[in-house]
Image: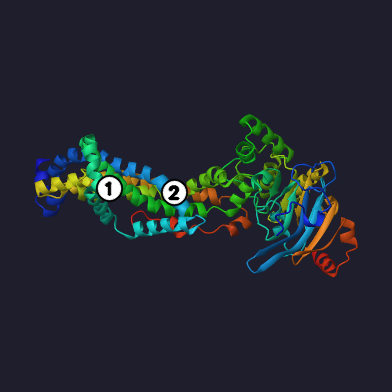
């Protein structure tokens, strides 16, 4: 065993990237940061859902006054790098007078909140991630809602349901079923994107790995961090694939009649996704 | 559009001055009245002035070649299409008046579609219950009881827990009929309800419709089923090019058509 470890460390690649000794040291450090990354991913995702729904309905709105702000927002957010958005929001917000006044007025915001990180970090980090993700989700929701056959709305309305009731009980439940895989892929993307928060000093996995790598002159800590990301993304990705198969089966299998098939528009391209390449 | 007047153009002598005061289901007045109805989609005029009165318990079958405006006419009755001219009256309510709460009208007008439009995420029972619960605010137990009753009535008492995807087209269409009936509609609209069905499944749906007619339901039926029209209709209306060309009892229209276009159409069909 001893001789194997010595032999392993003789190659630059294994020594610099896969050193067992360094990985052993990095493991507890990154394990401690794992919940931070997960929390930012999950919390931003949850916050982005209502935001995305709101934007989706705005974009489908009847008047330009409602449609345009949503369209502009979605285009700008999806058309610029998340990293840039993080820098703008994170450092931009801190220069606003109201922000300083708020911190003076509420000193607890500067106290450790969760995982020893103060509240202002959460406020800015979550805001930018959720704002970003809501733009992507808006398109997912919109495409999902518009993929529901218009006969569904007509049937609901013909029974006397007002539009909001028809939306809530007829259209949205079908939409959720249909977009669930895409939505989960969006979560995978978002979870990976939390790594960008390391640039503004939020102590999630990538930042901890960077610190560890810098102090050991060795890249192995990054490999540990990578393994932690994969721990979430690979099982979830597999689950999404299974879910899609099941969905394709239940929607195709003996359900719709030929006429309905013809009237059903194909799923818009935004619903096709490959979570490794989508951004 | 003469929206300001509450009186239908072609029935000015009837006392409909104030909605709610004179209409009664028993005094022989029409339950649905369509006066000079016009509908355009962009530059295309689909309905060019249609007049029909439909009395309680009448079964009016609308025939005509495709593109003649039959479906559009039907969809104007519950305002799935907004008329561009004329008036549509349901009982004492002017359907296409701006101030009309259309949901109040739709509660009492059942509609069945060519493509069924069942809600795929709900079981047969769920499909029949949802509008009872959310629109009529019936209790869960009552909605369930009525759903069972109506599904039984259309011969699907043993399929209540099936999802639409697990039912045949004919069964789905019968669920759709039960869904509409559960709202206790005063009028039922049928829009080519058998056109998407395999031939062997058409019979079951038509049987349900015939029973409904025999039970006294007021029905407006757009169909290509001539046998059904002849057997069940109290009146047949033949439309072409956005107008009513001819109307009368089934034997009048089928056995002794007056108009050249009607003869031509019936000749092609049979």
Tag of residue A54? 2
Q: Are marks 1 and 2 in contact (CB under 8 Å)?
A: no
The residue lying at 54 percent from left, 59 percent from top is A265
The residue lying at 16 percent from left, 43 percent from top is A23
The residue lying at 77 percent from left, 41 percent from top is B21
On screen, residue B2 above or below A200: below
Front one among A37 and A1:
A37
Mark 2, Cα crowd under 10 Å, few <14 / some 14-19 / many 20+, is some
Task: Locate residue A104 relative to residue A259 in the image: left or right.
Answer: left
Front one among A180 and A97:
A97
The residue lying at 77 percent from left, 48 percent from top is B17
Task: Locate residue B79 relative to residue A264 in the image: left or right.
Answer: right
Q: Secondary structure at mark 2?
A: helix
In the rendered image, residue A110, in percent from the top left (x then y), is placed at: 21, 38
Q: Quadrant of the rendered structure where residue A68 is?
A: bottom left
**First in sequence: mark 1 vs mark 2:** 2
* Residue extending farthest top: B141
On screen, residue B85 above or below A8: below
The residue where tag 1 is placed is: A194
């Amino acid at each position: 065993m001893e001789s194997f470890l010595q032999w392993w460390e003789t190659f630059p690649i294994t020594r610099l990237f896969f050193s067992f000794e360094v990985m052993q040291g990095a493991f507890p450090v990154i394990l401690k940061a794992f919940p931070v990354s997960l929390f930012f991913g999950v919390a931003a995702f949850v916050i982005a859902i209502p935001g995305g729904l709101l934007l989706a309905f705005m974009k489908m709105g009847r008047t330009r006054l409602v449609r345009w702000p949503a369209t502009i927002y979605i285009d700008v957010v999806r058309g610029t790098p998340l990293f840039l958005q993080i820098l703008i929001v994170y450092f931009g917000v801190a220069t606003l007078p109201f922000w300083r006044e708020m911190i003076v007025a509420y000193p607890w915001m500067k106290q450790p909140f969760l995982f020893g990180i103060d509240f202002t970090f959460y406020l800015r980090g979550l805001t930018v991630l959720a704002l970003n993700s809501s733009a992507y989700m808006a398109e997912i929701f919109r495409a999902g809602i518009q993929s529901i056959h218009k006969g569904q709305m007509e049937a609901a309305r013909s029974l006397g349901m007002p539009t909001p009731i028809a939306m809530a009980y007829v259209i949205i439940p079908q939409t959720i079923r249909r977009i669930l895989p895409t939505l989960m892929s969006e979560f995978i993307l978002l979870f990976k994107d939390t790594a960008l928060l390391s640039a503004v000093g939020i102590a999630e996995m990538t930042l901890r790995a960077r610190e560890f790598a810098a102090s050991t002159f060795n890249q192995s800590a990054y490999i540990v961090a990578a393994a932690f990301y994969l721990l979430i993304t690979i099982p979830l990705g597999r689950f999404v694939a299974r879910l899609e198969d099941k969905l394709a089966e239940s929607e195709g299998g003996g359900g719709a009649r030929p006429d309905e098939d013809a009237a059903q528009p194909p799923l818009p391209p935004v619903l096709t996704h490959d979570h490794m390449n989508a951004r | 559009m003469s929206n300001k007047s509450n009186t239908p153009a072609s029935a000015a002598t009837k006392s409909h001055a104030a909605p709610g005061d004179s209409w009664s289901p028993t005094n022989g007045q029409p339950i649905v009245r369509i006066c000079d109805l016009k509908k355009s989609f962009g530059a295309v005029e689909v309905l060019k002035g249609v007049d029909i009165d439909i009395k309680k318990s009448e079964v009016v079958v609308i025939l005509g070649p495709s593109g003649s405006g039959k479906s559009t006419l039907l969809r104007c009755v519950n305002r799935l299409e907004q008329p561009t001219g004329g008036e549509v009256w349901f009982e004492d309510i002017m359907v296409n008046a701006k101030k009309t709460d259309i949901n109040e009208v739709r509660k009492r007008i059942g509609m069945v579609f060519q493509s069924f439009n069942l809600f795929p995420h709900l079981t047969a029972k769920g499909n029949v219950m949802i509008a009872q619960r959310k629109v009529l605010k019936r209790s869960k137990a009552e909605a369930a009881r009525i759903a069972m009753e109506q599904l039984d009535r259309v011969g699907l008492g043993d399929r209540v827990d099936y999802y639409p995807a697990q039912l045949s087209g004919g069964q789905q269409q019968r669920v759709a009929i039960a869904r509409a009936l559960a709202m206790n509609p005063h009028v039922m609209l049928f829009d080519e309800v058998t056109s998407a069905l395999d031939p062997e499944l058409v019979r079951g749906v038509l049987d349900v419709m015939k029973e409904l007619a025999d039970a006294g339901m007021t029905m407006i039926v757009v169909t290509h089923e001539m046998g059904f029209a002849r057997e069940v209709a109290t009146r047949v209306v033949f439309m072409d090019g956005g107008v009513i060309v001819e109307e009368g009892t089934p034997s009048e229209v089928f056995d002794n058509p007056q108009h050249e276009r009607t003869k031509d159409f019936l000749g092609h069909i049979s």
